[in-house]
Image (cartoon, rainbow, N blue to C red):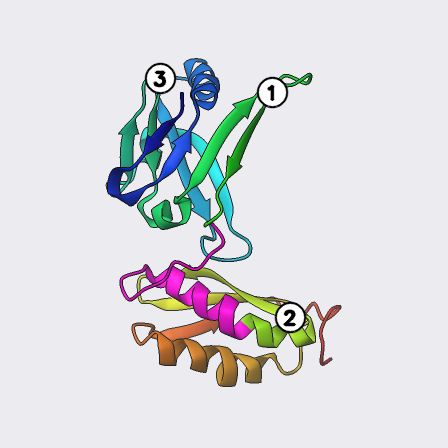
Amino acid sequence: MSEVAENAGLMLTITESAQDYLAELLAGQDDDVLGIRMFVNGPGTPKAETCIAYCRKADLEDSDLMINYDKLTARFELRSIPFLKDAFVDYSKDRMGGQLTIKAPNAKLPQVNADSPLEDRINYVLYNEVNPSLASHGGEVSLLEVTEEKVAILQFGGGCQGCGMVEATLKDGVEKSLMEQIPELTAVRDTTDHTDRSQAYFK
């Protein structure tokens, strides 16, 4: 029988076979492992990746949602919860032993509103407005981090790396779009190594 977590709007299913498998893995871990932690890297972007990891004391976040299942304790990153809606975790045995599968249909979909984390709103602008225009030059830009001073640290890739027009692209395109739509930002910085010009669109 599957268990569906509905706490805090989290509609996520972990099947009984998946719980058995995860509980067996947890049983072999050290005492500092408290259960599992589920989160999405790069949520709301085409590069989103749904992850399940061992949760140690050092990994705990006060904002995590904790759910006690019959056979294990699971924690879910608060930021990831909208992207884990309708996620399905299952384990099926096969001739090679078995496989844990995670299906998260909403992980790559933008889940953005005025209350969304700064990172999610920046990624929304980058992936839905900026990158489609850069794609014509084979380029892209991604968010590395947002500093405590609310500075967006970016990295260009593809045809934008080492491109002779990248400074204009940053100032007149990317920075302008981000600063206009996300007024909390104080600055936008590019940390790309532009000495590598092997893929540059304009050399």
Q: Secondary structure at mark 2?
A: strand
In front of the other: 195 or 20: 20
From the image, tell me which residue sits under label 1: 98
In front of the other: 190 or 125: 125
Disc 3 crowd rating (10 Å Cα; few below 14, some 14-19, many 20+) is some
User: Per the image, is 115 magenta?
Assistant: yes
Please report whichever mark, 2 or 1, sits nearer to the chain's N-terminal start. Answer: 1
Asked if residue 145 is positioned above or below residue 200 in the image, the reply reads above
Determine which quarter of the picture holds residue 124.
Answer: bottom left
From the image, tell me which residue sits under label 2: 139
Look at label 2 and name its amino acid. Gly
Q: In the image, residue 147 lies at what x, y percent? A: 36, 62
Q: Secondary structure at mark 1?
A: loop
Q: Is residue 109 left or right of residue 115?
A: right
Q: CA distance from mark 2 to mark 1?
A: 39 Å
Question: What residue is drawn where x is 32% and y is 59%?
Answer: 117
Q: Which residues are magenta?
A: 107-130
Look at label 1 and name its amino acid. Gly
User: Per the image, is 72 magenta?
Assistant: no
Q: Secondary structure at mark 3?
A: loop
From the image, tell me which residue sits under label 3: 71
* Quadrant including the N terminus: top left
